[in-house]
Image: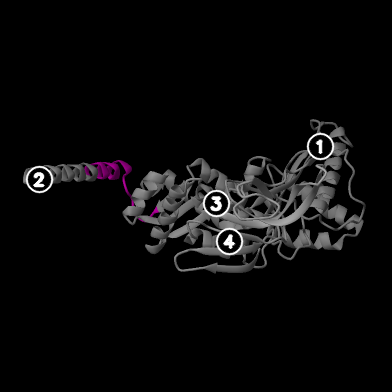
Amino acid sequence: MKLVSKYVDKNGAGYVNLRPEDDEDMWHLYNIIQQGDLVRAPAIRRVQNVSATGSTESHRVKLNLTIQVSRVEFSSSGAPSSSADQASTPLGSSSAAPTTTAALHISGPVASENRHVKMGAFHTLDIESNRDVRIEKVDGWDSVALARVEESCVPGRGAEVGAVVCGEGTAAFCLLSQHMTLVTHRISVPIPRKASAPGTSQYEKAMARFYATLYDAFVRHIPYTSPSLRAIVLASPGWVREGVFNAMMTEAGRRGDKTLSKALREKTVKVHVSSAHVHSLVEVLKSPEIVAQLKETKFAREGIVLDKFFKMLGVDEMRAWYGPDHVRLAADRGAIGTLLISDELFRASDPKLRKTYVELVEGVQQKGAEVVMFSSMHESGQQLNQLTGIAAILTFPLDVEVVEAEEREAAEEERRQQETKMLDGGGVG
């Protein structure tokens, strides 16, 4: 993302002008833009003109529109699937296709005068890469939104891990960047049951077909030549990953693809997972091989922290709390060591609800706690969302029942004091 211009005063009023460049930038914009914001971006609008004779003429006009956001929709392109019967890339091909394109649609009434569009007319902006987007927040920019802008503009981002999660005859190709997990492609090849007879069997022929299909798909969908790609993960149950790696090395040598051979030798990490489904990426990110190689990246940190929370929940549940109400109680007592919070909570349509989460984050940060913002486009973020989207690892144990009892007593005491004041006031009168 490129920061074109920015003006935000000390009270949070102002605007930010951004230029998205890739899928991850679209995801950042989705998390920055909220309902009620004023967004200005290029648009194409069909305009009708009425001539002196009464005939109408319709044509499309390019213009910049400012709308007040009522709805924001994001969709990452779905991963196409293929079978072994589909056409493959030519021999010796070593180029990887670009990542899939995400779509961001922002809808709302037009909020500024325009000679082609009336004020209040409803319009949907289709945000495009390399086109400026100006964002102004009516209620002001909070610290979480500004931090997201700064994070989105860090240079040198891109897919850091290319992963192939495979089983016998199936494979899903994934790209992991700081905030997104994109499933770029899937393949499925029918594999018969393994024959016990020696020699070439239908099983071996089918596996050879599977390896060939996987190789061609890998070349198209994993950008192994990219400098930002730090690891190529082959994950599977059993020993499928070993067969895949050996087959790919053999085929790359046969085709004379030295670039791919070098990438596979230097970057491949083979990881055992319990199933051949994409959700097994959570296990991949917790594996010691990946942790050692990617420990400073955001998505690996998310996996490590979430694993620590679940382990704490199993051995000392008084130090592992989740749910908005319970986490707030722990924050009030200064007990939070690490706050786990999903970016989904900051997309709340209710500005008051969003403000409570912003204040919670700011409060625990001021007390020295670590805040880990989880992306709901990663498997770890989706797991956290199943736990209400917010959790905390406490620095000291707290009994939920005791804390709730204390809260009830405090509320009851406050109520009694208010009643006493009312009675005293009545007596004076």
Name the amino acid, label 1: Val
**Which quadrant of the view contains residue 202?**
top right
Which of the pair 205/283 is nearer the observer? 283
Looking at the rendered structure, the secondary structure element under dot 4 is: loop
Does residue 29 show up magenta in the picture?
no
Looking at the rendered structure, the secondary structure element under dot 2 is: helix
Q: Please report contact status of discs 4 and 2: CB closer than 8 Å, yes or no.
A: no
Q: Mark 3 = which residue?
A: 34
Residue 107, compared with residue 255, is above or below; it is above
Crowd rating for badge 1 (residues with CA inside 10 Å; few <14, some 14–19, many 20+):
many
Which of the pair 289/427 is nearer the observer? 427
Name the amino acid, label 4: Lys
Distance between the Cα atoms at labels 1 and 3?
Answer: 43 Å
Name the amino acid, label 2: Asp
The residue at the point 72 percent across, 58 percent down is: 129
Q: Which residues are magenta?
A: 394-409
Q: Position of residue 196 (x, y in %)?
A: 81, 31
Of the residues under marks 4 and 1, which one precedes in the sequence?
Answer: 1
Q: Mark 4 = which residue?
A: 295
Name the amino acid, label 3: Gln
Of the residues under marks 4 and 2, which one precedes in the sequence?
Answer: 4
Which of the pair 54/98 is nearer the observer? 54
How is colour applied across the structure in the image? one colour
Q: Nearer the viewer, mark 1 or mark 3?
A: 3
Q: Mark 1 = which residue?
A: 189
Q: Please report contact status of discs 2 and 1: CB closer than 8 Å, yes or no.
A: no
Crowd rating for badge 3 (residues with CA inside 10 Å; few <14, some 14–19, many 20+):
many
